[in-house]
Image (tube, grey):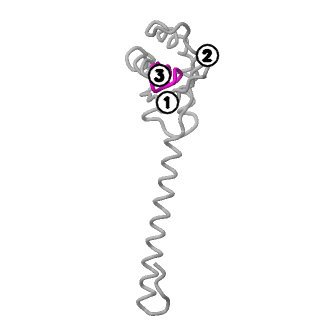
Amino acid sequence: MFRGFSRTQRVADQIQRNVANILQMEMRDARLGMVTINEVKVSTDLSYADIYVTFMGIDDDQNGFKEQIKILTEACGYIRSRLGKMSSMRSVPALRFHYDESLIRAGRISSLIDKVIREDEKNRQEQKITNKDGSTDDQT
């Protein structure tokens, strides 16, 4: 029976929900800040799961999120055992945590777009002023 999503996608969604629950309710490491799980990608053979995370209150510097990833990596055994108890999967994929830089890249792209828009508006205003003097034609 076709369900609309592949098995790997359903497993990834279940892992995302369960790991988020474990991190929020059960992890007692004071060094670990607020973690957001952005995406989980599971291999086709379900042997490993790549978990992409971001952290609230951590600067974009390399040391801040590397320390948080290290804490999560050290807790992989505990998280994986809890996943096994929470799900009906025969075997739980090995977990690999990665810092998700897509939000940082999106912010940079957005700021570049805003900068180009501001420069374009400035150029259009200058062009209109020049056209009122009669020295050039308006090309818009």
Residue tagged 2? 47
Residue tagged 3? 2
- Assign the C terminus to one quadrant of the image: bottom left
Q: Which mark is residue 15?
A: none
Residue 120 spot, x, y in % from top left: 47, 70
Q: Residue at x 43, y 71 (%)?
A: 121
Residue 66 spot, x, y in % from top left: 57, 30
Q: Nearer the viewer, mark 1 or mark 3?
A: 3
Residue tagged 1? 39
Look at the image and say whether residue 2 sits in the magenta stretch.
Answer: yes
Quadrant of the image occupied by residue 18: top left
> Magenta segment, principal secondary structure?
helix
Identify the residue at the far bottom of this view: 134
Residue type pointed to by label 2: Ser
Q: Nearer the viewer, mark 3 or mark 2?
A: 3
Magenta stretch, residue numbers: 1-15
From the viewer's perspective, is residue 137 above or below residue 79?
A: below
Residue 126 spot, x, y in % from top left: 45, 80
Residue 99 spot, x, y in % from top left: 55, 32
Look at the image and say whether residue 9 sits in the magenta stretch.
Answer: yes
- Mark 1 residue crowding within 10 angstroms, few (<14) / some (14–19) / many (20+): some
Residue type pointed to by label 1: Glu
Residue type pointed to by label 3: Phe
Identify the residue at the far front of this view: 1
